[in-house]
Amino acid sequence: MSDRAPSPDRARLEVHGISKRFDATLALSDVSLDVRAGEIHALVGENGAGKSTLVKILAGVHVPDAGRILLDGREVHVPDPIAARALGIAVVHQEPRLFPDLSVAENVFLADPPRGRYGAISWREMRREADALFEQLDVRLDAGAAVRGLSMADQQLIEIAKALSVDARVLILDEPTASLSAHEVERLFTIVRRTRDRGVAVLFVSHRLDEVFALCDRATVFRDGKHVVTAPIADLTTADLVRFMVGRAVTLFPKAEAAIGEALLEVRDLSRTGAFRDVSFAVHAGEILGLAGLVGAGRTEIARVLFGIDAPSAGEIRLGGRPVHLGSPSAALRAGIAYVPEDRHRDGLVVDFSIADNITLPILPRLFPRLLVHRSAERTLARGYAERLRVRTTGVEQLVQALSGGNQQKVVIAKWLATNPRVLILDEPTRGIDIGAKVEVHRIVSDLAASGLGIIFISSDLPEVLAMSDRILVLHEGRIAAEVPRSEATEERVMFAATGQVAATLPVSAPATRTGAGGGDA
Amino acid sequence: MSEERAAVAAEQPAVPSALARRRAPLAALARWELLLLLIIVILTWAGTQISKYFLTGANFANLTSAVMEVAIMALPSTLIIIAAEIDLSVESMLGLSSAVLGFLWAAGVPLQLDIGIVLVVGALGGLLNGLLVARAGLPSLVVTLGTLALFRGLAQVILGTNAISSFPAWFTTFGFDSIPGTPVPWTLVVFAVLAAAFWYVTHATWVGRQIFAVGKNKDAARYSGVDVATLKTALFVVSGIIAALAGVILTARFSSARADNGTGLTLTVVTIVLLGGVDINGGKGTIPGVILAVFTIAALQNAMRLAGVSSEYQAVAIGLLLIVSVTAPYFARQARLVSDRVRGGRHPPATAVDPGEVIP
Amino acid sequence: MTATRARPGGGSRPAALLGALARSRELTLVAVMLVLSAFVTLRAPNFLAPDNLDQVTTLAAIFAIAAVGEALVVLTRNVDLSVESTMGLIAFIVGDVLRQQHLPVAEVWLLGLALALVLGMANGAIITLFKVPSIVVTLGTLSIYRGIVFVVANGSQVSLSDLPAGYSNPATETLAGIPYFVIVAAVIVTVFALALRYTHFGRQLYAVGSDPEAASIIGVRNGWVVFAAFSLCGLLAGVAGILWGIEFGTIYATSASGVVLQIVAAVVVGGVAIAGGSGTVVGAAIGALFLGLINNALLLLLLPQELLQAIYGAVILLAVSTDAVVRLRNRRVAQAAAR
C-alpha cells in the first residue's frame, strides 16, 4: 500500500458502463465516472437517480449486472463489503449501521482491532487511536461510551471516523450531512479536504447544492439511472445543476380540474420531536396537496402521524372541523384516513395473501360483523375494485407476490379505496413501477380527487408532483420551507426550496417566518 | 382457506412458473397432511402387530384420553405460533390449575365453583403473558419461560407436595370414562368441540385471517388497521384458559390434584403444533393438520406403550420428532431447489437466508 | 468489564444516569446480596458458619460455570435449554464409566468433556445449518439428551460406593479456606471474561448479538460464531455435570432435571440482555451466586422451599422488564437528543 503517491492527473477510481437492474427497475444504465486522486468529486441527482445504487456497488453491497471497476488502472471485483475494505474503499453510508451495545471506539475498530501482547485486543491502543481520530475530526465524543443513546449526528460522525480509520484510497460519502448541524458540517468539510490533500480520491454524494459548491472540485449528475454530465464545479452554476438534475421531458398525466370543496383535514402546528416541527396545512375535498422535499425532510414522518402510527409531540389535527385523536391506524381508518405507505412490501401488503385477502383486510370487521367470512361476497367486492383500478391478474385469488410492482401498488390503493376514506395519503405511490403503471396511478388519483376525496401526494419525483398537485408544500429539514400554488410551480422553484435555498435566491409566497427558518439552516 | 386456494390453482393450470412456485407451500401443506395420515395408518398397522388390543374400543379410549390435555392446549398454541409468538408456560398453568382446584376442593368449595375460579386464574395468567409480550414488547420466549417457572412455583406454594383426591364420582367419570355404549371418552368430546370452534375461527372468520396476517407481516397488518397488540393478548388469554381447562381434565383423569401435574408437557404441545405443519416462524399452518398431529402422537405413544417402551423413551421419540418437524421445511426447500434446477427453471428469487437470520 | 457500557459524559444527564445504573448491574447484585446476607444473619446466625458458606458457594460454583456457557449463547441472541440434560448426562456417564472400568479418573473426565462438546456442537450445527430457532431445537435436545441418560442408566443409579474412594472429597475440600469448586469456577469465569474482552472472537460474539446484519457487513461469519457459542456452552455444561457428580456422589438418571430455569435466570439476572449483545460472564456468575443465596436464605429462614421456583420465575420477568425499560428510556433520550 506504500505505492500510493498522489498523482493528480491519474484516475484513482474508474467506473465503466455499470448497469444494475432490480426486478422491473433499471436503477443504473451504462454509467461511467472517474474520481482522481486528490479530488473531491460530487455525485448529484434527484432521489432515485441511481446515486445510492452506485455507492452500494462500490461498497460491495450490490454486484453490478454489467460494467467494470478500475482502481489505479487495474480492474477489481468487489463481491462483498470485506473486499471493498481490503481494496481501500471506505464508505460512509447514509444511515449509520453501528452496534448499539458496543463502545464508540470499538465500533470504529471492530473489523480489525489493534492488538497488543499475545495478540490480545489492546483497549488502551484502541481508545488512543479513537481519541486521535476524534481529535483530528475536532469532535468531542467519549470513545468509551456506548453507542446506544447517542444522537444520529454523533453516530454519523462515528461512521466517518470508521471510514477514516482505514487507510483509504477512495473515500465515499453518501449524503453524510443529512443529520449534521451546520457547525458539524463545516468540521466534516475540513476533514474531507484534509483527506483529499493526502491524495485520497473522494466521492461526495449529496442533494445539497450549496455543499457541492463549497466542497467539490468536479461534479457528475445522474438522472433516471443515467449519466448526464461531468464538469468542473467552476464551470457550473446552481441553476445549471438543478436543470441537469430535473430537466426531462414531462409526459405525465396532469390532474383533471376538480371543484375544490371544504377543508377535510386540517393540521395546526403539528410537531414530532426529531422528525418535523410546526407544520400547518389543510387538505380540501377534491384537492391534491403535494408534499415535496428531500428524503428525510419529514414527509413520511408527517404521514405516519396523520395515520396514527406515531404520536405527535405537539399540535392539533382536525377532521371535518373537529379535533381528533389518532392513536392507532385503526382509529385513523375509522376517522376516514387511508395511507398508501412508502414501502409497499414491508407495510402495504401481505405478499403471500391473495389479492382479495389484501383488499378486504382493513374492512373485514365492517364487512362481516358476524365474524364469518363469506368468500363469495369478499371476492365480488375485491373483483369490483380490482376491475375499477384495472389490476392485471388471473383472478382476485392470485397471490399478490406474483404481481408486478405497478399492479401490487394498485392492490394497495384498492385496499384503501375499499375503506371508503375521506382523505387518502399516498407516499411515493409510483416508486419502482414502470411508466405505464405510473400513468395509470396518476389517472386513478386524479379520478379520486374528482370524486371529492382530499389527497396528500408525497413524491420525490418532481415532475409528477408538479403535474398532480393543486398546491405543493415543500419541506426542508422538518419544516415547511415553501407553499407553492399550481400556477407558480416550477421544478427549479421547488428544488431550490427543498435544498434550503429559498431565502437566498427566489422570492416565495410562503409566510415569511417559515422561509426565514428554512433559509437560516443553510 | 388453503383448500380453496388449491382449488383455484387447479382451475388455472397455465400460470407462469413464478406463480406456481408461490403456490408450492400450500400444496406442500396438503402433502404434509397426507403424510400425517399415512403415518397414522402405518402406526395403526404397527400397533396391531404389537398387540391384538390395539384396535379395540377400549384401547382407542385409552389412546385418545391419554393425550387430550396436550391436544386441547395445542389448539391455542397453534394460533399463537401462527401469530409468530410462542407460549412455553402452558404446562405450568396446567399444574397451577390442578393445584388451585385441589386446594379449593379440599377447602370445601363446591367443585363447579372451583372449576370456574380455575378458568379465571388461567385467564389472568394468560393476560400476564399477553400484556408483557404484546404491550411491553418483551420476547414471548423469555416471558413465558419466566411464567413457566412462576406458575409452577405458585402451584407448589399452594399445594406443596400434597395430592388431593377424593373428588366426586361425576368428576372422575368425566375424566376417564367414555360415553356409555361407545368407545368415545368424554374428554374427546371436549376436544372435538374445541377443535371445531378453533377450526371455525381460524379458517372461516376474519379473526383467523387477521392472525395469519399478523404472523406473515406484522407491520402490514398494523398498517391495515389490525389491532396487533389486542389480538396477541387475546390469544395468550385463551391459551391460559385452555391450559387451565387441561388442568381440570388432567385432575379428573388422574383423580388427583398435584402441583407437579403436567410437568414436561410443553414439549409435547409444541411438537404437536410443529408436527401439524405449523411454521415456527409464523404465518402458516392449519387446524386440521394439528388435529392429525394429535392423533399421530397419540398412536405413537400408545404403540410404544403397548410395546413396553417406558415413558422416558417416549419423551426421546417426541424430542426427535420435534427436531425432524422443524428441519423438514429446510429439506423440502432444498428438494424444491433441486427440482427447480432440474426442470431448468429460472433461479428462484433470493430465498437464501441472511446470516443474520440464524438468530431467532 | 464495564468499559463497553455507557459512561457519564457520553450523552445527556438522564442517559448517563441510566447508563450508570445499567453498568452497575453486577454491583447492584453484590449490594443486594450483602443486604440479604445481613438480614439472614440477623435471623439465622449460622448463615455465616464456614460450613454453610462453603456449601452455598460450592453449589453456586456449579451453576456459575453452567451460567457462563449459557451467557455465551444468550449473548448471540440464542438460548440453550438443553444444558441441564447435558449436565445430567455427563454426570451420569462419568460415574457410570468409573464404576464399570478401572480407568484413571482424569481420562474419564476428559471423555466426559469431549462428549459434552459434541452435544453442544450438535445443537449449534442443527441451529446454524437448518436456520431453525434455538429455542425449539434445544427444547428437543433437552428431552433427547435426557433420554440418552435413561438408556445408559437403564433403571440403575450410581452410588458413592460405586465410585473410587474419596471421589466426592473435592466437594468439601478447601484451599486456603476457599472451596475447590469455587476456585475452579473462578478460573473458568476469569478465562472466559478475558477471552470475551481481549480476543477478536469474543468481540464478534457481542457484534453478532448486537446487530447480526451489521456484523456480517464487517465480515463476521455469524453462523460460525453461533456454532462456537453452543459448542462452548455444551463443554461448560459438561464441566458443571462432572462437578455435580462429585458434589452429590449419588447420581440418578434424573439428576439436574429442571435446573435450566435456574441457569437462565442467573444469566438474565446477571445482566445479560436476552436480546443479545450486552452483558458479561462475570454478571452471569454473580447471578448464579445470587440465586444460590436466595435458596439458602429460604432454607435458613425456614420458609417453604416451594417458593423457590416462583421466585426464579418472578426474577426472570423482573430482569427482562427492567432491560426493556432501560432500553426504552435510552431510545427516548436519543430521540430527544437528535434535535
Image: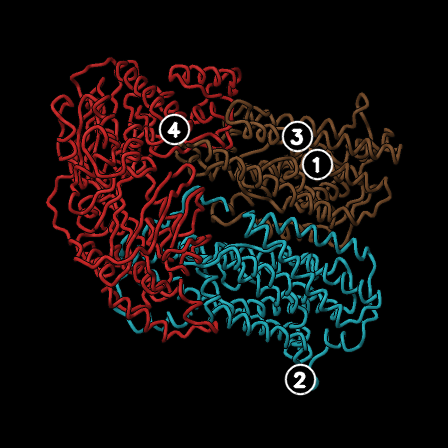
Labelled disc at residue C26? 3
The C terminus of chain C appears in which quarter of the rendering?
Answer: top left
Percent x, y of residue C131: 47, 48
Q: Which of marks 2 and 4 is in front?
A: 4
> Residue tagged by mark 4?
A156
Q: Are marks 3 and 4 in contact (CB under 8 Å)?
A: no
How far across and down, in percent of the image, does residue A97 sit?
40, 34
Verify CB contact (< 8 Å) between mark 2 and mark 1: no
Tag 2 residue: B182
**What's the chain of the residue with tag 1?**
C
Chain letter matching colour red? A
**Residue underneath mark 1:** C288
Name the residue nearer the viewer: B250 or A512: A512
Q: Kindly identify the amino acid type of the residue bearing the numbered disc 3.
A: Glu
Q: In this view, does C332 lie above or below A261?
A: above
Identify the chain of the residue marked 4, using the numbered disc in the image.
Answer: A
For badge 1, the amino acid type reads Ala
Q: Chain letter for mark 3, please.
A: C
Q: Badge 3, how many Cα within 10 Å: few under 14, some, many 20+?
A: many
Residue C295 vertical placement versus B231 (above, below): above
Front disc: 1 or 4:
4
Dot 4 crowding, Cα within 10 Å, few <14, some 14–19, many 20+: many
Question: Closer to us: mark 3 or mark 4?
Answer: 4
